[in-house]
Amino acid sequence: DTLTVMKVCCIGAGYVGGPTCAVMALKCPDIQVTVVDRSSERIAQWNSEKLPIYEPGLDDVVKKCRNVNLFFSTDIETAIKEADLIFISVNTPTKNFGNGKGRAADLKYVESAARMIAEIAQSNKIVVEKSTVPVRAAESIMHILHANQRPGIRYDILSNPEFLAEGTAIEDLVHADRVLIGGEETPEGHKAVEKLSWIYEHWIPKKNILTTNTWSSELSKLAANAFLAQRISSINSLSAVCEATGADVSEVARAVGLDSRIGAKFLQASVGFGGSCFQKDILNLVYICEGLNLPEVAAYWQQVIDMNEYQKSRFSQKIIESLFNTVSDKRISIFGFAFKKNTGDTRETPAITVCKTLLEEGAKLDIYDPKVEPEQIIDDLTHPCVTESPENVKKAVQIHSDPYSAVRGTHAIVLCTEWDEFVTLDYKRIYQSMMKPAYIFDGRKILDHENLQQIGFHVQTIGKRYQRNGLMPSWGTVPQL
Ligand code: UDX
Ligand code: UDX
Ligand code: ADP
């Protein structure tokens, strides 16, 4: 039995499965990679000119490999049958019903993928869990596979969590800090780990391929996301202190980050973190801790989420307060709806919280985002709906394909996503077309605030207080601590 893997199948053609397999195909010309999904629409998009997800560099990679050694297909059965190694890369949303509602990961898609494999497989398979799943999920997959095993067929289950971030997925995959592979501590387990490692060794230096036991691997994925989110909540908590005292959170972040033990990354104060992973994974960690009867640990991580909710609502309230405590029937422009720049993804985006709060207060929204599809924005703002009916939300929201059209006659601009293009807009022109006084709320701290104030804007941002006239408050007005 050689170390060579010839055919790889990936179940789930989403944000993780798609880019991961594209890069794998690019770096491993000797491997045939087939990505399958039960959504024929998704697969058709992957086979078309307009891919279902936007990711810098992805189009080029897919164009190079598609129908050479990278295939997108709905024929799940054939792909499973032929593959030596199968990635499970389906979604694992937070459960929205029943036991663990709002916290536990819903493993139904993972389970259904495992059952499909058990039903179809006619030869040995290495099954690799790539979706972020609760610790011990590999065990559940193993149970399902073994309970439905045909005689003579062997399954090895590995955990191989993906650490890519959206917007930089290709770069993250090509130059991964590390690849993590968890497996069983048996000779067969080691063999399976080696096979998967062989695939990554096509482009990742061997010293960056970490092998652990399965549980460590699963927990490390949750831990990494929890740590990253915790840094954002920590700096965001200090942003509130800064606004109350006259300190500047950017200066604080810089001073703190220069300590090599702490490091400078992920200390950018913001309107709050979003994305499909941070909240979901921490909720999942909290749920697991409660199940393990570790309430102090659960409470510790829960606070990271609570601080994020606080930050989103604090920012929204600041907008309303600044606009004389009423936004009813006022036009407000939203710059950016994605949860971060360079992605069209809106899952858990803080823009949803900001927009819903403003809509509840009766505002009319003009929304512009360079990549998010208009239908997606409407869907996000109506499911679940704010106090108003979906029809009223649709009446109150206008989506624009150009930032200048989004600001005509508006009272305020609320910047929710740090798209580069927002930095270089013609703000003089924008100021002229707005109602006065004209406000800008910079939820990402990317604009040139001094310049905006000179133009005439009232500027508010995260973690730094400006006076109405643009000057810092005099020390006399700052509460003495
Ligand atoms: C600390 C800061 O490091 C220093 O920058 C500041 O000026 C004063 O406070 P100190 O208290 O002298 O310095 O020691 P430090 O090395 O930070 O350790 C503090 C405690 O944390 C110790 O009890 C240490 O054993 C513990 N620690 C540190 C851990 O338990 N785990 C670690 O990974 C690091
Ligand atoms: C994250 C992890 O980074 C990645 O390793 C994991 O595999 C999946 O989850 P992602 O959610 O795609 O990736 O994006 P990330 O860049 O981590 O940003 C998450 C959120 O935090 C965004 O809303 C971003 O704007 C926000 N953020 C990030 C901050 O507010 N401040 C920061 O300093 C960094
Ligand atoms: P992620 O961000 O984790 O990649 P996505 O939601 O983007 O999640 O993608 C997951 C994909 O998995 C979806 O396209 C979904 O249709 C697919 N999927 C879920 N369950 C199955 C299944 N049992 N068989 C095939 N595809 C599945």
Image (cartoon, rainbow, N blue to C red):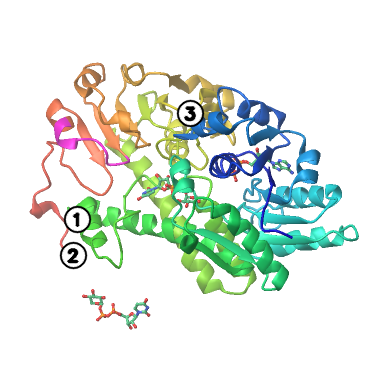
Q: Is mark 1 on a helix, strand or loop?
A: helix
Residue 447 on the magenta span? yes
* Quadrant placement of the C terminus: bottom left
- At x 17%, y 58%, the residue is 479
- Decide: is 26 above or below 106: above
Percent position (x, y) of residue 391?
Answer: 57, 22
Q: Which of marks 3 and 2 is nearer the N terminus?
A: 3
| Residue 358 falls in image quadrant | top left
Q: Where is residue 249 in the image (x, y as percent from the top left)?
A: 24, 53
Tell me the number on the disc at residue 372: 3
Using the image, determine if residue 135 lies above or below residue 15.
below
- Disc 1 + disc 2, Cβ < 8 Å: yes
Q: Which amino acid does label 1 sit on?
A: Thr
Q: How crowded is mark 3: few (under 14 residues within 10 Å), some or many (20 or more)?
A: some
Q: Mark 3: which secondary structure?
A: loop
* Quadrant of the frame with the N terminus: bottom right
Find out if the beta carbon at label 1 lies less than 8 Å from the nearest ligand 2 atom: no
Q: Is residue 143 above or below residue 20?
A: below
Q: How far apart are the two marked residues, 3 and 2, measured between alpha carbons?
A: 44 Å
Residue on which the image places disc 1 = 245
Q: What range of the chain is rendered magenta?
A: 443-451
In depth, the one of 209 and 405 nearer the eye is: 209
